[in-house]
Amino acid sequence: WCQDQNTFILTTYTSTTCRMKISFISSVFFFANAVNAFQSSFTPGSSAVPGVQSGSSLCMKTVAVIGASGLTSTECIYQALKDGHKVVGLTRNADNVKIPQGSGGADADKPYNDPNLKIISGDVTKLSDVEKVFEDEIDGVIVALGGKTKDVGETMLTDGTKNVIAAMKDKGVKRLSVVTSIGAGDSENQAPFFFKVLMWTAMKKIFTDKNNQEEVTRNSGLEYCIVRPGGLTVDPPTGIVNVIDGEAGSIPRADVAQFCIGAVLDPDFKYIGQAPCISSVGGTSWTKDRSAAARGGEN
């Protein structure tokens, strides 16, 4: 007998007609199975593999989230996992990495139980700790660091981001999204007046660090997007993200997370090399790219 794909033809059938019939019938079944497999892999909301609720293993990416226990970071983690990706997080407080209030609904504040999530306990200001994140193959990095200056030091944002950039370059990782704030860099005039007063007084040191963090990112040579959100809330996601030129309004952290994920995974993300201010009101609307290409597949 001979084998061609999944078609088996017994040589005892000497009739050419029989051979053609058997080959044709087998080919039909082979084609039908292939079509069914394709539909199972790419129909929204379905999965060919039990337990995977969204995305396809062919499209799965790995996102690193630095500062993984922060309120914006946990939104990034939750939504990346929901989109079918893997996440590697770095934080000093691993026990604080929980399902976020905004997107998590009834599961908010519960610990994660997801095989696609890996949390590393470490200090972003220590290069050796940051390098542990990149022991996995990383496709994009989201830096969403925070904390009070008296607790984390006056240069933590800048020093930590320098370490992340160094580790990315060592491993050839290109995409970087860094969350700073409205009012940072050249966006001071986009901050509401009462917030400017805080920037000039109580928050002066943290904004010096944020400005230096942005400068390090701009000079990194990476495909970066500096994300400057307006007033952050823990509300559920609205799906509305506006890039604004004027004064910033508020925005849920959940929507900021979607923007950050787009910045590191969407191949044609339009704000690479820029520092957009984002808000839920005004400005130019941004919509997440959910095409096959953005998920790592073909159009």
Image: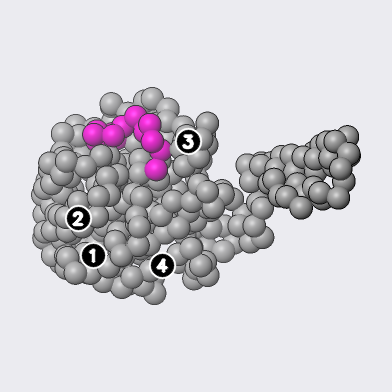
Closer mark to the observer between disc 2 and disc 1: 2
Magenta part mainly helix, strand or loop? loop
Q: Nearer the viewer, mark 4 or mark 1?
A: 1
Query: Which percent across, then down, holds residue 239?
Result: 50, 38
Asked if the residue under mark 1 is in contact with the one under mark 4, i.e. CB atoms within 8 Å, the reply is no
Residue denoted by label 4: 118
Colour scheme used in the picture? one colour
In front: 274, or 75? 274
Residue shown at the point (56%, 64%) measured from the top left: 107
Q: Is residue 65 above or below residue 230?
A: below
**x then y, percent, for residue 193:** 22, 37
Work out how far the residue at label 4 is from the one at label 2, CA to CA, in angstroms: 21 Å
Q: Position of residue 10 (x, y in %)?
A: 82, 50
Magenta extent: 265-277
Q: Which residue is mark 1?
A: 131
Helix, strand or loop status at disc 2 = helix
Question: Is disc 1 surrounded by few (<14), some (14 to 19) or many (20+) residues within 10 Å?
Answer: some
Is residue 292 or residue 237 the one in the foreground?
Answer: 292
Pair 4/3: label in front = 3
Residues under labels 3 and 2: Cα distance?
26 Å
Q: Is residue 121 visible?
A: yes
Q: Which residue is mark 2?
A: 170
The image's mark for residue 293 is: 3
- Taking the image as shown, residue 114 lies to the left or right of residue 190, namely right
Looking at the rendered structure, the kind of residue marked 2 is Asp
Looking at marks 4 and 1 on the same chain, the residue that comes earlier in the sequence is marked by 4
Q: Which badge, 4 or 3, comes first in the chain's sequence?
A: 4
Q: Report if the CB atoms under discs 2 and 1 are less than 8 Å apart.
A: yes
From mark 3 to mark 1, how far is it between C-alphas? 29 Å
What's the amino acid at mark 1? Glu
